[in-house]
Amino acid sequence: MDNRQAIGSWLSGPRAAIEEAGADLGYRGEQLGLPEEGPGSIARPGRRIGALAVDWALCLLIAYGLITDGYDQATGNWALLIFFVLSVLTVGTVGFTPGKRLFGLRVLDLGTGRPSPLRGLLRSALLCVALPALIWDRDGRGLHDRLARTVEVRI
């Protein structure tokens, strides 16, 4: 193995290295019985991050405009509380926040295929902690989704 090949395998990540070794990991969501493309498929990271950015900006705007006098630490704290409440209420009932709806995403219970208030509460609490959302599995689901037994799919 020359240096270019070693660097290339490092840059492409562990999934590419495993597949290069001969293992077939399948597509994201295959283990969950979801389609590979289109509606019902696993949401891609770009859409998820975009939806999160829209929701966070909306919560910051609400906290800045309605609760605090200026932008400071309190604004961020209020925005986190607003984000939690918004996420619990919307994800638990209709399956999406305004940002998720804008990006064509929906959060569903793995067992029933519908939104669940209890799972929405657990998922939102774990998302506000942030660390579980940064740990992903091979299907592209964050630890907060795995623990809440939910999946974020495209509409």
Image (spheres, rainbow, N blue to C red):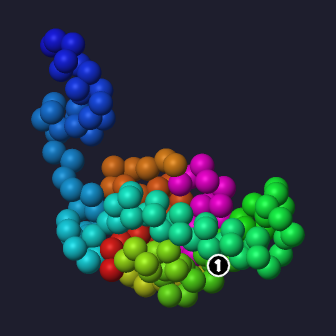
User: Which of 42 and 52 lies nearest the eye of the viewer?
Assistant: 52
Q: Is residue 75 part of the magenta span, yes or no?
A: no
Q: Quadrant of the C terminus?
A: bottom left
Q: Residue reaching furthest bottom?
A: 93
Q: Residue reaching furthest right?
A: 69
Q: Is residue 26 left or right of residue 152?
A: left
Q: Residue reaching furthest front?
A: 70
Q: Is residue 84 left or right of residue 64?
A: left
- Residue 74: give x, y in percent of width and height: 84, 61
Is 28 above or below relative to 152? Answer: above
| Residues drawn in magenta | 119-133
Q: Quadrant of the N terminus?
A: top left
Residue at screen point 20% across, 65% down: 36
Q: Is residue 77 visible?
A: no
Q: Judge the density around disc 1: few (<14), some (14-19), many (≥20) Cα neighbours within 10 Å.
A: some
Q: Is residue 129 part of the magenta span, yes or no?
A: yes
Residue at screen point 63% across, 83% down: 89
Q: Say which amino acid is labelled 1.
A: Leu
> What secondary structure characterizes most of the magenta part?
helix
- Residue 127: give x, y in percent of width and height: 60, 61
Element marked by disc 1: helix
- Residue 92: give x, y in percent of width and height: 56, 82
Q: Quadrant of residue 20?
A: top left
User: Which of 33 and 135 lies nearest the eye of the viewer?
Assistant: 135
Residue at screen point 46% across, 75% down: 100
Q: Is residue 134 visible?
A: yes
Please name the residue that numbered disc 1 is placed on: 86
Residue at screen point 38% across, 58% down: 46
Q: Is residue 100 left or right of residue 121?
A: left
